[in-house]
Image (tube, rainbow, N blue to C red):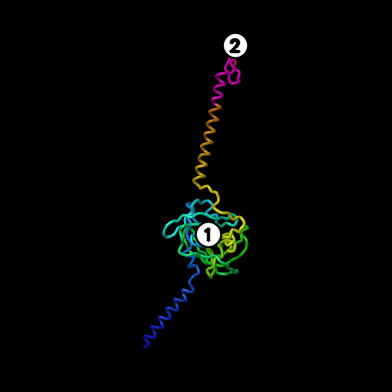
């Protein structure tokens, strides 16, 4: 009997402990299935799904990228920029790839020193970091928040959420203090999606890829060399014609290219 009671108590304790662990699990659980590496060829960033097939990232990640690729376990999926804002550095992508989960954007509030989580792909590898809200103020004219959660190149476009799992920001860059990260505040993300944020335009910016720029530079170099050779040929040819036509004897004084050479008889 005592043994049975002990087994029951152990079982109850195990379930209770499991329930506590589940309740205390990080609020980024939903973000894990909604956040992805964004491959732009020569560099990478981060994108996260806020609605089926719709993703958010930092504008500077895709501004020079013709076809941003959302990388998941099933492969790389094409996406297109359908909305962008250069001033506040945010862009919306659309893809046929539907992620397992989404991170809904809803009204949320934050307080100084509040615990925050960042889900991003620093160095091209997805990971979650946690930190505290350091400040809530404009950075370079952009309405931003600063967090002590780890960010690094590749984190741009990542999502910042609070303990409730609500979106509070979108990672844009490191702060002047390299231990802090800067993110666009959530209300302005909503304003961007509603096309109420000044500077928001549909579609991507007209861009030239690195290969296009290289080809243009190559053609410019070819044109420059061709022009130089043409000028040299014209000068040499002109001087040759002038020399052959201008050599005349005037009282045995040959005039060659404007210089007088005496023949020694005078």
Q: Secondary structure at mark 1?
A: strand
Q: Which circle, 1 or 2, is nearer the viewer? A: 1
Q: Which of the two residues, 150 or 89, is positioned nearer the viewer here?
A: 89
Q: Magenta segment, which residues? A: 236-260
Q: Which of the two residues, 252 or 95, is positioned nearer the viewer here?
A: 95
User: Between marks 1 and 2, how big is the CA–CA gap?
Assistant: 93 Å
- 235 in magenta: no
- 243 in magenta: yes
Image coordinates for residue 266, horizontal then vertical, percent: 61, 11
Q: Secondary structure at mark 2?
A: loop
Image coordinates for residue 231, horizontal then vertical, percent: 55, 30
Query: As displayed, is residue 168 above or below residue 251?
Result: below
Residue 235, numbered label? none
Q: Which of the two residues, 108 or 171, is positioned nearer the viewer here?
A: 108
Q: Which residue is mark 2?
A: 265
Image point (54%, 52%), residue name: 204
Image point (41%, 83%), residue name: 9
Image coordinates for residue 147, horizontal then vertical, percent: 56, 64
Q: Is residue 75 left or right of residue 129?
A: left
Image coordinates for residue 165, horizontal then vertical, percent: 52, 68
Residue 56, numbered label? 1
């Amino acid at each position: 009997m005592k043994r049975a009671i002990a087994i029951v108590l152990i079982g109850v304790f195990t379930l209770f402990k499991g329930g506590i662990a589940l309740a205390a699990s990080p609020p980024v659980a939903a973000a894990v299935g909604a956040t992805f590496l964004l491959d732009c060829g020569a560099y990478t960033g981060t994108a996260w799904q806020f609605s089926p097939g719709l993703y958010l990232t930092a504008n500077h990640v895709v501004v020079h990228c013709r076809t941003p690729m959302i990388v998941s376990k099933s492969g790389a999926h094409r996406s297109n920029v359908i909305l962008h804002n250069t001033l506040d550095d945010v862009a919306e992508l659309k893809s046929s790839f539907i992620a397992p989960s989404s991170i809904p954007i809803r009204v949320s509030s934050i307080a100084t020193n509040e615990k925050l989580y960042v889900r991003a792909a620093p160095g091209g590898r997805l990971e979650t970091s946690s930190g505290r809200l350091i400040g809530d103020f404009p950075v370079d004219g952009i309405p931003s928040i600063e967090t002590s959660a780890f960010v690094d190149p590749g984190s741009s476009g990542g999502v910042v959420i609070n303990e409730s799992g609500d979106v509070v920001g979108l990672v844009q860059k490191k702060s002047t203090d390299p231990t802090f990260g800067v993110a666009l505040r959530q209300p302005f993300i909503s304003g961007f999606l509603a096309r109420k944020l000044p500077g928001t335009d549909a579609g991507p910016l007209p861009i030239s890829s690195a290969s296009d720029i290289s080809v243009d530079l190559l053609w410019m170099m070819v044109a420059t060399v061709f022009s130089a050779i043409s000028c040299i040929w014209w000068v040499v040819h002109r001087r040759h014609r002038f020399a052959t036509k201008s050599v005349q004897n005037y009282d045995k004084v040959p005039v060659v290219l404007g210089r007088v050479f005496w023949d020694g008889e005078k």
